[in-house]
Image (cartoon, rainbow, N blue to C red):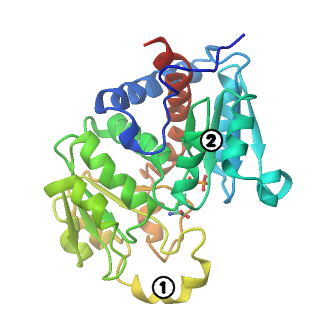
């Protein structure tokens, strides 16, 4: 029987990119590429045989849900989709009690929710690893896939320049953390009033610089990244945001300011004609579909790291 309980050290969690060391992050990404190769070759490996992942979704999802669920099955385990609509969480059962109970039944828990402190409170009361599947603050799983995609297409990202265009949101915050962990420069172009969290920026030191002109931010960039103008939970601000972000669109003109071989990333879902022009995201050599696929491989590697590798260490 699987021994889920880590009485001495407590389980490892993945609530932000800062929860793993740079070497561990690189190890997970290298493993993701290997798992991708082996999956494509039809090899069957089941390091998570009989393991169960509980997945709590308080926001919508296509990629996160399907990649975790397919990933667990491919590694020999199973995943449970838990929505607040039909669990006691939606009727006010405390997150701490939910953590105590679920973590005695499953081997790992993934949570997508609003407040970041909810995943922290869950993790503090969990006997098993907790993975952040997106909060209002950060989206670290997406960054594993993004870094894997950059490595696979262009090699190491250390020393490169990345440009973020748009909202200083959860994805932008994860790029700030990634700039620290993977050692790249990050130019952040966002409208006044939509800056990222100042503490996160301060922690990243002089690696990150805020711009008001997206074209200037893209100069000499190796990777241009954007995301929706209004995130989940900000639906009522949509009209106001459409005005504020009108100039923060990734166009061909903007991509022309970046290096000739610069990549374009988007975590998806995308709004063509808003944050990105169709001719950029739909270019024949667009890598956003590889980026989405890599959610599967990167999270399989993360699950293996949390449930097997880090326990053996
Ligand atoms: N990028 C991403 O997390 O997509 P979903 O919202 O579909 O999970
Ligand atoms: N910033 C977006 C990302 C979606 C994957 C949101 O939080 O809705």
Q: How many residues crowd around disc 1 within 10 Å: few (fewer than 14), some, or many (20 or more)?
A: some
* 20 versus 59 height, above or below: above
Q: Report x, y in % for residue 226.
A: 40, 64
Query: Which residue does the image show at 52% across and 27% down from the upper left?
Result: 11
Q: Is residue 122 above or below residue 104?
A: below
Q: Position of residue 56 (x, y in %)?
A: 70, 47
Q: Secondary structure at mark 2?
A: strand
Does residue 263 appear in this view? no
In the image: residue 297, left or right of residue 249: right
Q: Nearer the viewer, mark 2 or mark 1?
A: 2
Instruction: Examine the rendered structure and indicate whether residue 216 appears above or below residue 53.
Output: below
Q: Tag 1's secondary structure? A: helix
Q: Across the whole image, how many numbered discs are drawn on residues?
A: 2
Q: Residue 83 location, x and y as percent?
A: 77, 52
Distance CA(mark 2)–CA(mark 1) = 32 Å
Mark 2 residue crowding within 10 angstroms, few (<14) / some (14–19) / many (20+): many
Q: Which mark is on residue 41? A: none
Q: Which residue is mark 2?
A: 110
Ligand 2 near label 1 (Cβ, under 8 Å)?
no
Q: Residue at x 37, y 58 (%)?
A: 173
The image quadrant where one finds ligand 1 is bottom right
Nearest to the observer: residue 290 or residue 22? 22
Label pair 2/1, CB-CB below 8 angstroms:
no
Quadrant hosting residue 190? bottom left
Q: Give residue 242's mark.
A: 1
- Residue 52: tell me if it is visible: yes
In the rendered structure, which disc, 2 or 1, sits on the residue that comes first in sequence? Answer: 2
Quadrant of res 200: bottom left
Give whichever of 135, 26 is nearer the camera.
135
């Amino acid at each position: 029987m699987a021994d889920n309980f880590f009485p001495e050290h407590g389980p490892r969690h993945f609530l932000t990119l800062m929860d793993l060391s740079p070497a561990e992050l690189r190890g997970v990404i290298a493993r993701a590429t290997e798992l991708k190769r082996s999956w494509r070759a039809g090899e069957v490996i089941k390091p998570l045989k009989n393991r169960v992942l509980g997945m709590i979704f308080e926001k919508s999802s296509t990629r996160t849900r399907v990649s975790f669920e397919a990933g667990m099955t491919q590694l020999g385990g199973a995943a449970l989709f838990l929505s607040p609509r039909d669990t006691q969480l939606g009727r006010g059962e405390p997150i701490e009690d939910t953590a105590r109970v679920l973590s005695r039944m499953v081997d790992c828990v993934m949570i997508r929710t609003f407040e970041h402190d909810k995943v922290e409170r869950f993790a503090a009361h969990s006997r098993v690893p907790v993975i952040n599947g997106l909060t209002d603050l950060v989206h670290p799983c997406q960054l594993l896939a993004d870094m894997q995609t950059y490595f696979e297409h262009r090699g190491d990202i250390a020393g490169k320049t990345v440009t973020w265009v748009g909202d200083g949101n959860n994805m932008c915050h994860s790029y700030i953390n990634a700039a620290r962990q993977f050692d790249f420069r990050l130019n952040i172009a966002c409208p006044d009033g939509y800056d990222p969290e100042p503490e996160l920026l301060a922690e990243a030191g002089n690696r990150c610089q805020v711009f008001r002109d997206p074209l200037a931010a893209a100069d000499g960039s190796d990777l241009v990244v954007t995301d929706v103008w209004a995130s989940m939970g900000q639906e009522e601000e949509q009209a106001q945001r459409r005005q504020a972000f009108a100039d923060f669109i990734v166009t061909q003109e903007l991509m022309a300011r970046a290096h000739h071989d610069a990549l374009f990333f988007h975590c998806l879902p995308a709004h063509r004609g808003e944050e990105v022009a169709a001719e950029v995201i739909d270019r024949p050599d667009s890598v956003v579909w590889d980026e989405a696929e890599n959610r599967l491989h990167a999270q399989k590697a993360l699950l293996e790291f949390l449930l097997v590798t880090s326990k053996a260490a």
